[in-house]
Image: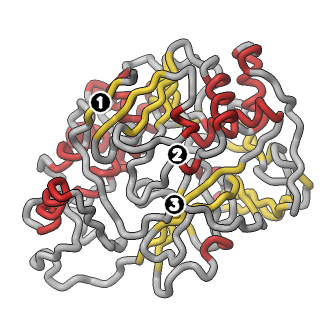
Amino acid sequence: MSDVIKIKRGVDINLVGEAEEVFAPALPIETAAVKPTDFHGVRFKLAVKEGDEVKAGTPLLFDKDKEQVKFCSPVSGEVAQVVRGAKRRILEVRVLADKETSYEDFGSADPIELEREAIIEKMAASGCWPFFKERPYNIIADPAKTPKAIFISGFDSAPLAPNLGLILEGNEKAFQAGIDAISKLTSGQVHLGLNATKQVGRTLAQVKGVKITKYDGPHPAGLVGVHIAQLDPINKGETVWTINPEHVVIIGRLFLEGKFDARINIALTGSEVQDRKYHSTILGAALKPFLNGNVSGGLNRIISGNVLTGTKVTEEGYLGCYDRQVTVLREGTDPELFGWLIPKPDKFSISRALPSFFMRQAEKVTGQKVSYNLDTNTHGEKRAFVVSGQYEEVFPFDIFPVQLLKAMMTGDVELMENLGIYEVVEEDFALCEVVCTSKIPVQETVRKGLDLMKEEMG
């Protein structure tokens, strides 16, 4: 029987715009892109040039510092464009997709029969290795290291998050093969976190070879960082890897079929999306076919990912490598006269001064869900950063968040280490950024702190 851990601190942000749990008819894949901006801290080198013909699994880029780690095309077709930014930094490698996908052959194999080095070589060559994230520092895992544990979160508690049971439905065999391969990479346990109060779907319920722990509580209960802090906190000199369950499925297909089959399911969410459903697509797919004619008029913000940690893109943009939803909200550009004075019930806040706090308390009693139709307006501006106790209400780590952030701002490496920076990444602080009355760019501050620690400590 699995354990259940109660997460008490945090808050659910119920936005208008949840996707209906049905799949829309499949749309053709016209173009796809690999975006180096999805992979922090990597020095890229191009492996192709515009006009080259590629297959799914053909390397488009590789890591200059770890040349065995490849970033491969999710489709077959022609390399249409290499988009560059300032100082010729590579932003996207776009591939014009064939109508029928052809694949590089990496050879099928039973991961149970393979040695660890052979599994790593196969994943790195096929484009699957970038799916692993390493903590501390939240960077692509180093194949030369052996993590003390690998963590997978089997549910998503972010606003408008998709149902992972539905996203993974029908991939039982591939998911199990992926777990069999992943379990060879760690000296410890593969942990799978599940929601204690909701159905998880057959793919996650039937898997073997993992340590299952269930979590009950508000967001960020679904974050893998919370699971690590509860079960196996990271100390100095230790390494833990994380991976998304949909990426485990792609790894499983690699071993079952010998090809980089990057098909995934995503949810199209947000108040400004007219037909909110689930879609079958591929990693890095162009978003235009999903959004064209399906978004309300006016000024909108399109986000690859969720509203807390996603990336702002345009309608011509592409799905991020680690994203499983696309969200569209109204852009909040209009000033609100005396907005701080008006007790609007539709304004989300954890403060007891606004009606939304009492509406959430009533929700716990009645069970009737309260949803907020919010735009992107932050309703405030940057001001003095003081200890207010707000962060502690939504931050379920055994860490002093404000003190740690101030250590990051001042670049005090020793204090950051003493306050627990090895345990956290940007997404763990996303709710702090939401509730912050000082309007501090919290996640950006955490990223800079992690970069400084990596530079100083190696």
Name which of mark 3 and mark 2 comes first in the sequence: 3
Label 3 SS: loop
Residue at position x 72%, y 58% from top? 33
Q: Residues within 10 Å of mark 1 (few under 14, many from 20)?
A: some
Residue at position x 68%, y 32% from top? 65
Label 1 SS: strand
Task: Please provide percent x and percent y for residue 11.
Answer: 25, 51
Q: CA distance from mark 2 to mark 1?
A: 20 Å
Amino acid type, callout 3: Glu
Query: Mark on residue 168?
Result: none
Name which of mark 1 and mark 3 comes first in the sequence: 1
Name which of mark 2 and mark 1 comes first in the sequence: 1
Residue at position x 26%, y 83% from top? 335
Q: Mark 2 = which residue?
A: 165
Seen from the viewer's position, the closer of residues 413 and 142 is 142
Task: Please provide percent x and percent y for residue 179.
Answer: 62, 27
Q: From the image, which quarter does the N terminus lie in?
A: top left
Q: Mark 3 = which residue?
A: 21
Q: CA distance from mark 3 to mark 2?
A: 11 Å
Q: Is residue 170 visible?
A: yes
